């Protein structure tokens, strides 16, 4: 009887604990949806006052927030929580400077790759086990697969909406008569809706094109040519400076030891270049005097993407070819620390850019030089700041699983700082223009070259680089991907897992499968060589790959 009573009490206590957990989860979800509603209201206010061009930046930022919270939840569930079970106590002292440098105390935490175990975790003896190697590589791989298809789907959806359905409700009469929400009864909401419709009609009627004389066109061509030479030359000089600084970065850190200043040299220089050169590009755009603001924005974006992606490419070369080949005890943690500092310093410079680029500009334009007036929100520069930060986050996921959570916090702060700065310091665009395709363009730039470049770097790291011998979940292996190969070998001895082995050999690692997926036909020369190889009964994998290319 006592045993049944104890069992009942245990069940009741467990049920009450589960009920409390469910309530806490429900409260968290309600708070999250309330936050989303607040964002929705902020977006409506921005769209009504500044139009769809400025609104597209905040929609893109909100979209990136969703990406990062999703990544953080996946990493936290399948990588970080299991590591807490097997974690050893951290004996390093916390001084506070680690928040800026990412070194010291944080080296022995779940923030970095080197802290994670390579052992199979057993919480209960003879109970279920958890393979940390497989969990780490499959979680990161699954996240990138989901990101890939999400980006493709979002681009396709945005393209169909903004490029193929432009004639839907295009007339002003239909906008006034058919798009009004008659459920609106609040006076503020009515005025906000009226402002929004007014802005949309102005955008619809925009599009005046001025005709220039031959002389004016020649002058404009010369100005554009000189501006492009200046912008490309500035980008080359900046990339050269980052290259030489990054190559000597390990030597500087060795000479100065674990000096905080030595650790921050590279991220500060990279962030300074990324912060101030875009202002120079915006000034060049003002000199060029494009007919529509759209041309100005797109040209600024192209120049910024060349600068920022080139700098990221040089940093990736430094991490893959210098840091990974060094004699460091745990090169993956060093890469994670570099990316952490880059993300943090870039966030600080982003906030400073709002202060110096918008607040002080408003003070100057309204006090000292009234002819300048209020500044306009620089869409191109701000969008490329987001793409640069997200690119660093994607690269850093493999080396710092907590980085998406850090980026989610920084993007949330950036959202509200930019919103307040926009409402207080900026004026609506002087020229209204059609911006329905801007969100699609932002997504495309995020996909290529940003996401595609990140996949290349992650692929080289997983398949070609040798992991550190004394840290991380893949210590002792020839590559990170070798963990998957060894797992497949163990499954070959289990009859119930034969289907996994079949998928691995016939789909994932099969040249024939990728040949079938390819849309192009092989050249006649390749076909003859392939038939000749078949007659000689010597299947040539390299030949097949060459024919595919």
Image (tube, helix red, strand yellow):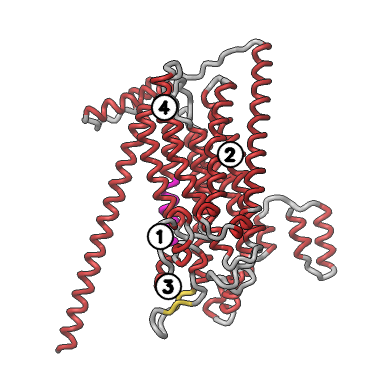
Which type of secondary structure does the marked residue at label 1 adopt?
loop
Q: Is mark 2 on a helix, strand or loop?
A: helix
Measuring from the top left, give residue 26's x and y in whole percent: 26, 57
Q: What is the crowding at mark 4: few (fewer than 14 residues within 10 Å), some, or many (at least 20)?
A: few
Residue position marked by numbered label 1 in the rendering? 95
Residue located beneath label 3 in the image: 87
Disc 1 crowd rating (10 Å Cα; few below 14, some 14-19, many 20+) is few
For the residues marked 1 and 4, what is the alpha-carbon distance in whole angstroms? Answer: 60 Å
Q: Which of 236 and 39 is in front in this view?
A: 236
Q: Which of marks 1 and 2 is nearer the N terminus?
A: 1
Near mark 3 (Cα within 10 A), the count class, few <14, some 14-19 or many ≥20, is some
Instruction: Say if 540 sits above or below 199 in the image.
Output: below
- Above or below, comparing residue 373 to residue 443 in the picture: above
Q: How crowded is mark 2: few (under 14 residues within 10 Å), some or many (20 or more)?
A: many
On whether residue 509 falls in the magenta region, the answer is: no
* Label 4, label 2: how far apart the Cα atoms are: 34 Å
Q: Which residue position is annotated with label 4?
A: 169
Residue 354 image offset from top left, x and y in percent: 43, 35
Point out the frontmost of discs 4 and 2: 2
- Say which label, 1 or 4, has the lower sequence index: 1
């Amino acid at each position: 009887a006592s045993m049944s009573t104890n069992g009942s009490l245990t069940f009741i206590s467990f049920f009450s604990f589960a009920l409390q957990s469910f309530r806490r989860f429900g409260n968290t979800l309600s708070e999250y949806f309330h936050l989303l509603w607040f964002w929705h209201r902020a977006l409506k206010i921005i769209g009504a006052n500044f139009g769809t061009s400025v609104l597209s930046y905040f929609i893109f930022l909100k979209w990136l927030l969703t990406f990062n919270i999703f990544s953080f939840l996946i990493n936290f569930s399948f990588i970080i929580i299991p590591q807490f079970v097997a974690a050893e106590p951290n004996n390093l002292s916390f001084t506070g400077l680690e928040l800026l440098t990412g070194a010291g105390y944080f080296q022995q935490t779940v923030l970095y790759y080197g802290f994670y175990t390579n052992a199979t975790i057993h919480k209960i003896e003879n109970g279920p086990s958890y393979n940390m190697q497989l969990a780490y590589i499959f979680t990161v791989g699954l996240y990138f697969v989901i990101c890939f298809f999400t980006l493709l789907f979002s681009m396709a959806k945005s393209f169909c909406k903004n490029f193929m359905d432009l004639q839907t409700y295009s007339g002003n009469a239909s906008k006034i008569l058919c798009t009004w929400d008659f459920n609106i009864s609040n006076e503020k909401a009515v005025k906000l809706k009226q402002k929004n419709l007014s802005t949309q009609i102005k955008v619809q009627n925009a599009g005046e094109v001025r005709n220039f004389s031959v002389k004016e066109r020649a002058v404009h061509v010369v100005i554009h040519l000189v501006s492009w030479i200046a912008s490309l030359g500035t980008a080359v000089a900046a990339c050269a400076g980052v290259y030489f600084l990054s190559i000597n970065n390990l030597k500087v850190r060795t000479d100065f030891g674990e000096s905080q200043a030595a650790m921050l040299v590279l991220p500060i220089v990279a962030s300074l270049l990324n912060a101030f050169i875009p202002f120079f590009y915006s000034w060049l755009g003002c000199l060029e005097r494009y007919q529509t603001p759209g041309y100005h924005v797109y040209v600024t974006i192209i120049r910024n993407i060349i600068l920022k992606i080139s700098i990221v490419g040089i940093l990736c070369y430094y991490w893959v070819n210098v840091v990974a080949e060094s004699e460091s005890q745990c090169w993956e943690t060093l890469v994670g620390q570099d990316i952490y500092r880059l993300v943090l310093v870039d966030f600080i410079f982003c906030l400073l850019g709002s202060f110096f680029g918008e607040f002080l500009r408003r003070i100057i334009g309204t006090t000292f030089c009234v002819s300048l007036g209020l500044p306009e929100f620089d869409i191109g520069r701000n969008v490329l700041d987001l793409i640069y930060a997200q690119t660093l986050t994607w690269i850093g996921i493999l080396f710092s699983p907590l980085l998406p959570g850090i980026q989610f916090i920084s993007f949330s702060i950036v959202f509200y700082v930019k919103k307040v700065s926009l409402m207080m310091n900026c004026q609506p665009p002087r020229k209204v223009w059609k911006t329905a395709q801007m969100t699609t363009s932002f997504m495309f730039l995020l996909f290529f070259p940003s996401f595609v470049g990140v996949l290349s770097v992650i692929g080289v790291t997983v398949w070609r680089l040798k992991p550190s011998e004394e840290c991380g979940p893949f210590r002792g292996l020839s590559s990170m991907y070798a963990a998957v190969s060894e797992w497949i070998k163990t499954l070959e001895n289990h009859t119930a897992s034969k289907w996994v082995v079949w998928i691995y050999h016939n789909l994932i690692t099969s040249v024939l499968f990728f040949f079938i997926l390819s849309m192009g036909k092989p050249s006649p020369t390749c076909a003859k060589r392939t038939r000749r190889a078949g007659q000689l009964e010597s299947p040539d994998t390299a030949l097949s790959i060459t024919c595919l290319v």
